Image: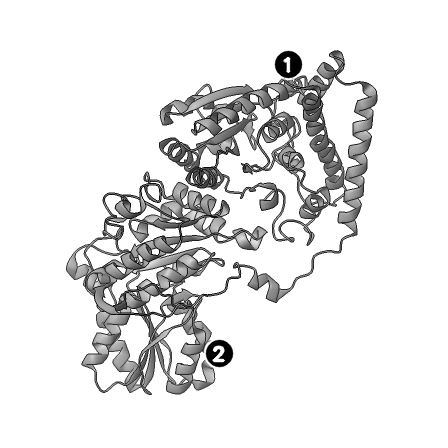
Amino acid sequence: MRYHIGQLEEEQLVGLYEGMLKPRMIEEKMLILLRQGKISKWFSGIGQEGISVGVAQALKPDEYILPMHRNLGVFTSRNVPLNRLFAQWQGKASGFTQGRDRSFHFGSQEHKIVGMISHLGPQLAVADGIALADILGRKKRVTAVFTGEGATSEGDFHEALNVASVWNLPVLFCIENNGYGLSTPTKEQYNCKHLADRAKGYGMESRIIDGNNVLEVFTKVDELCKALRKRPRPVLLEFKTFRMRGHEEASGTKYVPEKLMKKWEKKDPISNYEAFLLKEGIINQKKIDSLKESISKEIETNLKLAFEEAEVTADTEKEVREVYKESAFEHIEPKGETKRIRLVDAVSEGLEQSMERHNELIIMGQDVAEYGGVFKITEGFISKFGKSRVRNTPICESAIVSAAMGLSINGMKAVVEMQFADFVSSGFNPIVNYLAKVHYRWGEKADVVIRMPCGGGVGAGPFHSQTNEAWFTKTPGLKVVYPAFPSDAKGLLATAINDPNPVLFFEHKGLYRSVYGEVPEDYYTLPMGKAAMISKGDDLTIVTFGAAVHWAMEILEKNQNIQADLIDLRTLQPLDLATIYESVQKTGKLIVLQEDTLFGSVSSDIAALVIENCFEYLDAPIKRVGSLETPVPFAKSLEENFLPKQRFESALQDLHEY
């Protein structure tokens, strides 16, 4: 192995050696503890320390780095306290996730580290969002993100590279090509000689670097960082290395040919570099022994602290409370004149006024810039806010949701427009596994609103007509808003954007241009979790939301003999159960109407909760009315049959007569 010192000072050369030695010694200790049953799992980075340490030391302390589970050297290079690392691995309260997650699944704003999730891919576009925030803030910084060769087969990898290239984001995409994805060799994972070659397809630069040569890693990455700070752009780095232990320790390495293992043993990044330093007289054995003794003492001291810490104890109230970031609702009363506008205008106005109020707010989505979005919500926004804040995106929902998460991590807000709510399935993973869980896991906010044009009744067929709120009301950590009137849409959108938690904001396409209302011209907010009582009556309770509110109003108008409490939920998470319970306790009858299909839906939960909490007040079985258990059909007659409007009238009359 050839080492080129170049312009590096002796202190830097020794620092790289010490930087690799510490994670190696920690790992060796962890493997002992694993065999003793004192930690539950371990993903080894032995043999790959040169990459983690070389990259981390090349970055500035205020530049974000997004490591994976073989990058212990990143954490030690950023001086993360060892007692907290050890507590993290033991599931103790002083760990970064307070026992809620394991391994390296955490981040630390203090150390500008953003840890992984097990789905791997979303990590890459989170780096895009962080880098975009730096560009918008005119901060000359680089973001580095790690992945393995296995994850380069995921769609998120390709989406992230494409977005970074289109937007010229200063991201170092670091592939640790270590030979195997668990037991699957690289020849069964991709059919190109070098993964770095993939950069050509995205108009990106790339480099192939010997990942076991720490000097090559550091000097090349350092050179690139200096260049990217001056002229922002992404670069794909393929580090050639090898995984000397199993995917995780339980996997073992029996699937690796012995000859191949011996070949890479000779390329160990630490022993080779140590021999080089000794040969050059930069270090001596006494210094090596002293470093090892010092690191060993540090490990043992901090292990003692972690072991002495009590096991984490469950506090139900705390667990539930910390799913969401706590935030004080700022109630801004509507003032001034009102005007009669459509729901689509109210959404646009609320979004525009929020853009004026929050300079850090970015809108992203397909065709949202010059075109104004397919529903023209953002028409004219470019002239007022510019293309840096109103951003057309490639067709890559997953990467854009992840980039929104990155913007939030780096101090900004994001509104993402799904062109149609149906398309959110392509971005489902980062919503339910990253945004929803990030605060509960390590206390990080996800200041992201995802706008969801949804709903049927417009002859758009199976892929443009779903009202898929139940996909998200099921997931702890998400908030779900679903207004039925223009005034609610404007006020609740402002509240959603102010909220530091992830919000799915449903906007029914069928209501966009058919429903009018008086809406205050000035900026205002409305509270989440507070339903609206549309009408009052003692006969029965109707609970509904979205377009179904208007169906219920129309049918009540036709059936003047039925006097009902008509409750418009407005938000589905949080849900205003108090208003529902109070009404049911008064009327004794409940019918829940929704546009979605019934099985596993919001209506199912409402019915179950009322039975559990108001059973003794019920005078009739609860009725639920929803769409047929089919995809949404296209033909008008089929769609009318699919939707529950006519069935609701019959069910309402039956319940009234019960």
Q: Secondary structure at mark 2?
A: helix
Amino acid carrying mark 1 in the image = Tyr
Task: Decide: is 104 above or below 551.
Answer: above
| Residue receiving disc 1 | 3
Could you tell me the amino acid type at mark 2? Asn
Q: In the depicted view, which residue is nearer to us: 1 or 491?
A: 491
Q: Earlier in the sequence, mark 2 or mark 1?
A: 1
Q: Which mark is residue 85?
A: none
Q: Residue at x 47, y 56 (%)?
A: 500
Quote the CA–CA distance across marks 2 and 1.
72 Å
Residue 397: horizontal and vertical position, in percent?
A: 36, 44
* x and y, in percent, of residue 61 in the image: 60, 36
In this rendering, the answer to whether 516 lies above or below 371 is: below
Q: Quadrant of the C terminus?
A: bottom left
Residue at position x 48%, y 37% in the image: 139
Identified at 71% across, 44% down, the residue is 86
Q: Secondary structure at mark 1?
A: loop
- Reading the image, the residue beneath label 2 is 613
**Which corner quadrant of the image does residue 291 belong to?**
top right
